[in-house]
């Protein structure tokens, strides 16, 4: 199997030859519409045939993507969103179509606490309360928060259910519950220092405006380190599905802890078994530690499950890598199921607890192969294979595969001789 890196002129020629036929993934059937010039253009199934007026007042005021771009989020875990009662459950991000490390706000995955309605919050009426074991109980308006010193940082958020699995056929099913955005807000440490945390204060409980009163317990050390009370995302106000007007961002920790629609933070003296914590069964200290932080992780986004390669030749393998313990240091790619590994190219300077895009130049000779990627983070941790995780946890072959805490095992993609791509674990 050829894995050599062709020179620039060679792969540009090959890329040009492939450009007309490359399929980046399963797409909806298309219909054709003649433009004024007589040229036919593809349209997504169900999309209006009316050509948008991009000079209209509405689209001048707030832009819209081209009608030829059809990438959309999808419900995952087999639950419709919204369901028959209007509740929203988990909706995955189409990472297979993403370019670069930042997920567009409109395509950022949606995670909810056991299903909920997205609240409609007037920011002028919204308040954030800091109370509990503090010297001064404080209540902030949105205007007051936005007057305080702020930070802007790139961080991923990921659901604990995001993981490799034989049952999940596509990338959005296995890894669609992670996204990366640029968050702007006030460091929680700034607010806690203003309130004055008392010596007995060892934990915080963060609560949002949700019907199920979702809340999360977090250690005070993390709260004072890098947690952000965020009011902006990717350069604009956070969208309602992501917690408008205020959410907590807990870098590197599982997504359920980044409480949306944040309304109060209570400093307490012990770990509280809140609704979120009970649901994830963090009853023991070691379990809590394993559940909180996400280890080094990566996934190949192209080619990935249910995509199709049109023929042999050059391809740019693309993917995303991240780690809850720091920045991505290196990403390696294997085309033979892990027997040999090659360094991938990182796109941009890796940021702590953020997605890093990577690529690898690959020449496919038409033989069946297994594509894999693994992340090595800034503290030297290496993303494990599924077999390594199984051996570490002592799970016998044939038993149901389960992981205590976060599962960051490698996701392999099998490329068949006809160019079809399927889950390598199936």
Image (spheres, rainbow, N blue to C red):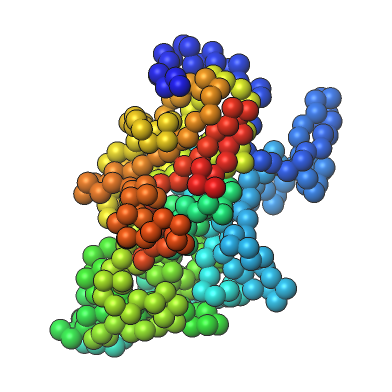
In the rendered image, the residue lying farthest to the left is 199
Say whether residue 183 is visible.
Answer: no
Residue 416, by quadrant, is: top right
- Above or below, 276 against 297 in this view is below
Q: Quadrant of residue 231?
A: bottom left
User: Residue at the spot x=53%, y=29% of the render?
Assistant: 368
- Left or right: where does residue 137 sit relative to residue 275? left
> In this rendering, is residue 246 above or below 381?
below
Q: Nearer the viewer, residue 115 or 57?
A: 115
Of 396 and 405, which appears nearest the observer? Answer: 396
Considering depth in this image, is 364 or 263 the residue closer to the camera?
364
In the rendered image, residue 152, in percent from the top left (x then y), is placed at 35, 55
Q: How many marks?
A: 0
Quadrant into which the N terminus falls: top left
In the shown orientation, is residue 46 left or right of residue 113? right
Residue 367 pos. (x, y %)? 53, 24
Q: Is residue 281 visible?
A: yes
Identify the residue shown where x is 29% and y is 88%. Answer: 132
* Location of residue 274 in the rendering, given as x and y in whole percent from the top left corner: 40, 83
Q: Residue at x 54, y 15 (%)?
A: 14
Where is residue 411? Give x, y as percent.
Answer: 45, 46
Q: Image point 43% across, 25% down: which residue?
A: 361
């Amino acid at each position: 199997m050829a894995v050599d890196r062709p020179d620039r002129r060679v792969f540009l020629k090959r890329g040009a030859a492939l450009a007309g036929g490359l399929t980046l993934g399963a797409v909806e059937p298309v219909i054709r519409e003649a433009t004024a010039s007589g040229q036919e253009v593809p349209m997504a199934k169900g999309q209006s045939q009316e050509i948008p007026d991009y000079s209209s007042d509405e689209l001048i005021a707030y832009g819209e993507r081209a009608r030829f771009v059809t990438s959309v989020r999808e419900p995952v875990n087999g639950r419709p969103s919204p369901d028959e009662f209007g509740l929203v459950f988990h909706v995955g991000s189409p990472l297979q179509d993403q370019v670069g490390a930042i997920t567009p706000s409109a395509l950022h995955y949606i995670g909810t606490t056991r299903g909920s309605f997205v609240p409609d919050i007037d920011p002028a009426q919204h308040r954030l309360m800091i109370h509990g074991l503090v010297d001064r109980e404080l209540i902030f308006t949105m205007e007051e928060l936005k007057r305080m010193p702020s930070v802007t940082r790139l961080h991923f958020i990921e659901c604990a259910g995001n993981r490799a699995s034989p049952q999940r056929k596509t990338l959005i099913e296995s890894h669609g519950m992670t996204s990366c955005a640029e968050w702007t807000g006030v460091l929680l440490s700034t607010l806690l220092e203003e309130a004055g945390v008392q010596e007995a204060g060892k934990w915080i409980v963060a609560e949002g405006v949700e019907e199920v009163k979702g809340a999360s317990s977090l250690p005070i050390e993390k709260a004072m380190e890098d947690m952000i009370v965020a009011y902006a995302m990717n350069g604009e106000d956070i969208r309602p599905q992501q917690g408008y007007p205020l959410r907590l961002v807990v870098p590197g920790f599982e997504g359920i802890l980044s409480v949306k629609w944040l309304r109060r933070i209570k400093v307490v003296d012990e770990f509280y078994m809140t609704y979120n914590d009970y649901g994830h069964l963090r009853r023991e200290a070691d379990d809590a530690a394993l559940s909180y932080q996400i280890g080094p992780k990566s996934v190949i986004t192209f080619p990935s499950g249910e995509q199709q390669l049109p023929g042999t030749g050059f391809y740019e393998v693309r993917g995303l890598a991240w780690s809850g313990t720091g920045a991505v240091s290196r990403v390696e790619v294997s085309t033979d199921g892990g027997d040999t590994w090659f360094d991938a190219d990182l796109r941009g300077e890796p940021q702590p607890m953020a997605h890093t895009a990577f690529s690898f130049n690959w020449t496919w000779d038409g033989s069946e192969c297994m594509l894999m990627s693994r992340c090595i983070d800034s503290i030297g941790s290496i993303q494990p294979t599924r077999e390594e995780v199984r051996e570490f946890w002592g799970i016998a072959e044939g038993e149901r595969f389960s992981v205590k805490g976060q599962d960051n095992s490698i996701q392999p993609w099998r490329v068949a001789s006809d160019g079809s791509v399927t889950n390598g674990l199936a």
